[in-house]
Image (cartoon, helix red, strand yellow):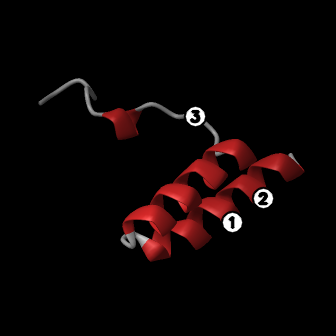
Amino acid sequence: MKGGDNITSKKAPMTPAAARRIQSAADRSGTNQGMKSRAMKAAAKNTKK
């Protein structure tokens, strides 16, 4: 796949609402526990700007 068709090629800042959705989904599924802290950290970093 050339041309950046995957979802990660789009640059969108992590928002606190998005981080909460990720945290909630991880809690419900019991997976991706490490992603919770990364999402919260990115949201905090993006709200400082």
The x, y position of residue 38, in whole percent, is 57, 67
User: Extreme front residue here?
Assistant: 28
Q: Is label 2 in a helix, a strand or a loop?
A: helix
Q: Quadrant of the N terminus?
A: top left
- Mark 3 vs 1: CB contact within 8 A: no
Disc 3 residue crowd, few under 14, some 14–19, many 20+, Cα 10 Å: few
Q: Which residue is mark 1?
A: 41
Q: What amino acid is at disc 1?
A: Lys
* Up-down relation of residue 34 to residue 49 (above or below): below
Q: What amino acid is at disc 2?
A: Ala
Residue at 73%, 48% (x, y): give it: 16
Regarding residue 17, the answer to whether it shows in the image is: yes
Q: What amino acid is at disc 3?
A: Ala
Mark 2 or mark 3, which has the lower sequence index?
3
Q: Is label 1 in a helix, a strand or a loop?
A: helix
User: Extreme left residue here?
Assistant: 1
Rounded to the nearest angstrom, the CA distance separating label 2 from label 1 is 5 Å
Q: Quadrant of the C terminus?
A: top right
The x, y position of residue 3, in whole percent, is 23, 23
Disc 1 residue crowd, few under 14, some 14–19, many 20+, Cα 10 Å: some
Q: Which residue is mark 3?
A: 12
Q: Which residue is mark 2?
A: 44
Residue at 64%, 40% (x, y): give it: 13
